[in-house]
Amino acid sequence: MYGLIHAALRDLILEDHGVETWNQVVLQSGVPSNSFLTMRSYSDETTMALVDAASQVLMLPTNDCLQVFGHYWVARFAPKEYGGLLDHTGGSLIEFFQNLDALHDRLSTSFTEFKPPSFKVKINTANSAVIKYVSSRKGLTPFVIGIITGIGERFDTAIHIDAVDSSNSDQGEVSDILISMASNG
Ligand code: HEM
């Protein structure tokens, strides 16, 4: 994946755990020190080696690590450089979810080699929806869950994940994520 994703993981660990922990993660991952150029695309193995190393050093299961990372990505990292894009992605929570493909489409002129995920929203009731996540990769559904809860915070809404139904194939991963939403006021 693009080095932007690696840079975000690095910033999360630097900000929340410090430079010594980050140095341990890099050492443990075995990835070259030039794997963090934001606009360069790296192999997914490099990305997953960093996530696995973070999970070992922080002693957190990989899925928990991905979830924390997803939350950090949308709540603290993306707003720094891409705040305008996030602001234009939707005026409501549901609209934001419906526009996730458009968000990644807008980035495709800068990230020419990227393979973004795709999302579809099925509204059940005013407070409940299914978000279908389709990826050419496997194992990133917990990252999506972290992002979804972070997006809820942008709209002052607590999001509860009621059920996750994932399936893997050679093509990647598809997950139906059933959410319920409660406005914080
Ligand atoms: C403005 C903010 C955002 C930027 C700049 C951005 C950019 C990117 C980039 C560069 C990648 C790497 C793809 C590759 O290298 O092939 C990526 C992947 C991904 N993005 Fe975004 N993204 C943003 C917001 C979001 C949001 C709000 C979601 C919501 C769920 C999301 C979900 C994902 C997921 C799940 C992946 C992993 C790839 C996969 O699932 O196959 N992104 N994004």
Image (cartoon, helix red, strand yellow):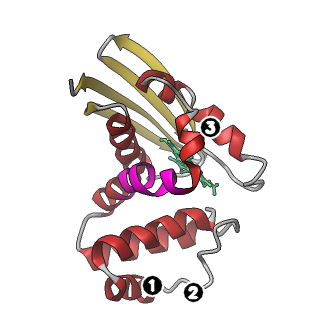
Q: Is mark 3 within 8 Å of ligand 1?
A: yes
Q: Which x, y percent locates residue 11?
A: 43, 70
In this rendering, the answer to whether 182 lies above or below 111 is above
Q: Secondary structure at mark 1?
A: helix
Question: At which x and y percent is residue 35?
Answer: 60, 78
Foreground disc of the pair 1, 3: 3
Q: CA distance from mark 2 to mark 1?
A: 8 Å
The answer to whether 19 is drawn above or below residue 114 in the figure is below
Mark 2 highlights which residue? 33
Please say if the residues under marks 2 and 1 sit with CB atoms less than 8 Å apart.
Answer: yes
Question: Which quadrant holds the N terminus?
Answer: bottom right
Residue sitting nearer the eye, 148 or 135? 148
Q: Is residue 15 left or right of residue 41?
A: left
Q: From what the image shows, is residue 24 above or below residue 15?
A: below
Q: SS class of the residue under badge 3?
A: helix
Rate crowding at label 1 as few (under 14), some (14 to 19) or many (20 or more) other CA atoms within 10 Å. Answer: some
Which residue is painted at 63% across and 67% down in the image? 38
Q: CA distance from mark 2 to mark 3?
A: 30 Å
Q: Amino acid at mark 3?
A: Leu
Residue closest to the eye, 24 or 83: 83
Amino acid type shown at disc 1: Val
The residue tagged 1 is 26
Viewer-proximal residue, 75 or 99? 75
**In the rendering, at what x and y percent does residue 20 appear?**
33, 89
Residue 152 x %, y %: 34, 34
Q: Quadrant of residue 66?
A: bottom left
Mark positioned earlier in the residue sequence (2 or 1): 1
Residues at marks 1 and 3, CA–CA distance in whole angstroms: 30 Å
| Earlier-in-chain disc, 2 versus 3 | 2
